[in-house]
Image (cartoon, rainbow, N blue to C red):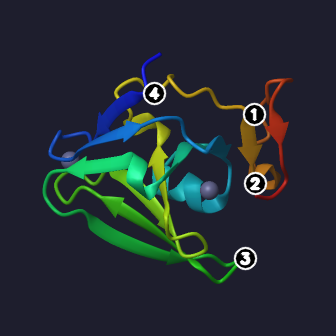
Amino acid sequence: MNTSNEGGCLCGAIRYQVSGEPALVQACHCKFCQKRTGSAFATMAAFKEEQVVISGPPLCEYKHQSDESQRWVCCHFCGNCGTTVLITLERNPSVRVVPGGTLDNPGHFRITRHIWTRSAHDWIVFPPDSQVREKA
Ligand SMILES: [Zn+2]
Ligand SMILES: [Zn+2]
């Protein structure tokens, strides 16, 4: 089994490698993820700090305070093309969240859990075998 996966930003300046299995793989339907991706929902894989190695120029940061929890979520993105390649959370600073679409093989980690579905678009149909949560 392949225990190492690579990914990066759109322009190729930022590359990363993740090793081992993620602690959590999910799709998030919250308003923040809809805005930041410009899409209906975001897919993401959560790793421990030591499982993720990033190379390239320093990442830019945008910290967004949650209306719900008042804690920040930080998007780390490429200063050239704007792709968010990493997300960190005030709530759990050692976690490294990788946006699913930035993996070279985005389908590698199967999404089995959907969160913040109370703000999901009404055309979304959840697979019957997935965990569906109104909130996180
Ligand atoms: Zn880039
Ligand atoms: Zn979200």
For disc 2, the marked residue is: 116
| CA–CA distance in space, label 3 to label 1 | 23 Å
Label 4 environment density (alpha carbons within 10 Å; few <14, some 14–19, many ≥20): some
Q: For the point 14% across and 45% down, which residue is it?
A: 13
Residue 9 image point, x, y percent = 27, 43
Q: Nearer the viewer, mark 2 or mark 4?
A: 4
For disc 4, the marked residue is: 106
| CA–CA distance in space, label 1 to label 4 | 20 Å
Type of residue at label 3? Glu
Residue nearer the viewer, 26 or 38: 26
Type of residue at label 1? Ile
Residue nearer the viewer, 132 or 29: 132
| CA–CA distance in space, label 3 to label 4 | 29 Å
Q: Nearer the viewer, mark 3 or mark 1?
A: 3
| CA–CA distance in space, label 3 to label 2 | 12 Å
For disc 1, the marked residue is: 124
- Secondary structure under tag 4 reads loop
Type of residue at label 2? Trp
Residue 83 image point, x, y percent = 32, 50
